[in-house]
Image (cartoon, rainbow, N blue to C red):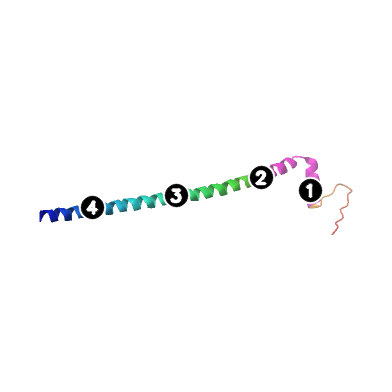
Amino acid sequence: MARKKSKKRSRKKMFLLGFLSLVIIAGTTYTIGKYWVEIYDKYKEKKELKKELVSLKEKEEELQVDADKLQDPDYIARYAREKYSYSKDGEIILRMP
């Protein structure tokens, strides 16, 4: 009879140990999976931000060229005549369709 009780206790302990191990493994797997998903999302976001950075740098270069052009008085005068139909003294503007 003592043997049966010790076998039952041994089985209960093994079952409890196995169940506890399963819970720990499942929890660890879930946590690792969650972190992998976060890392992958950050990786994708990094790629998108790099593309955006390249685009913004190109736009910055274009704007810098335009800013440099606007420092030239001849360019400003020509731009104003073309864009806003300003004319020099004695000059007549004819619009063509």
Discs 4/2, front: 4
* Mark 4 closeness class: few <14, some 14–19, many ≥20 residues within 10 Å: few
Residue 16 is a magenta residue: no
Tell me the residue at 56%/47% (across/down). 47
Please state the horizontal and vertical placement of residue 35, each as a whole percent of the image. Answer: 43, 49
Look at mark 3 in the image and give the residue it sits on.
36
Q: Residue at x 31, y 53 (%)?
A: 23
Labelled disc at residue 14: 4
Q: Secondary structure at mark 1?
A: helix
Please tell me whether residue 27 is drawn above or below residue 57 in the rendered image. Answer: below
| Magenta span contains residue 70 | yes
Q: Amino acid at mark 3?
A: Trp
- Spatial CA distance of label 2 from label 1 is 26 Å
The first of marks 2 and 1 along the sequence is 2
**Residue drawn at 21 percent across, 52 percent down:** 13
Tell me whether the residue at label 4 lies in contact with that at label 2, contact meaning CB atoms closer than 8 angstroms: no
Distance between the alpha carbons at the discs numbered 4 and 2:
66 Å
The answer to which of marks 1 and 3 sits earlier in the sequence is 3
Q: Is residue 89 left or right of residue 40?
A: right
Does residue 81 appear left or right of residue 31 in this picture? Answer: right
Marks 3 and 4 in Cβ contact (< 8 Å)? no
Residue ID for mark 1: 80
Q: What range of the chain is rendered magenta?
A: 57-83
Foreground: 61 or 36? 36
Q: Amino acid at mark 1?
A: Ala
Q: Which residue is mark 2?
A: 58
Callout in the foreground (1, 3):
3
Q: Relative to the observer, which residue lies in front, 61 or 70?
A: 61
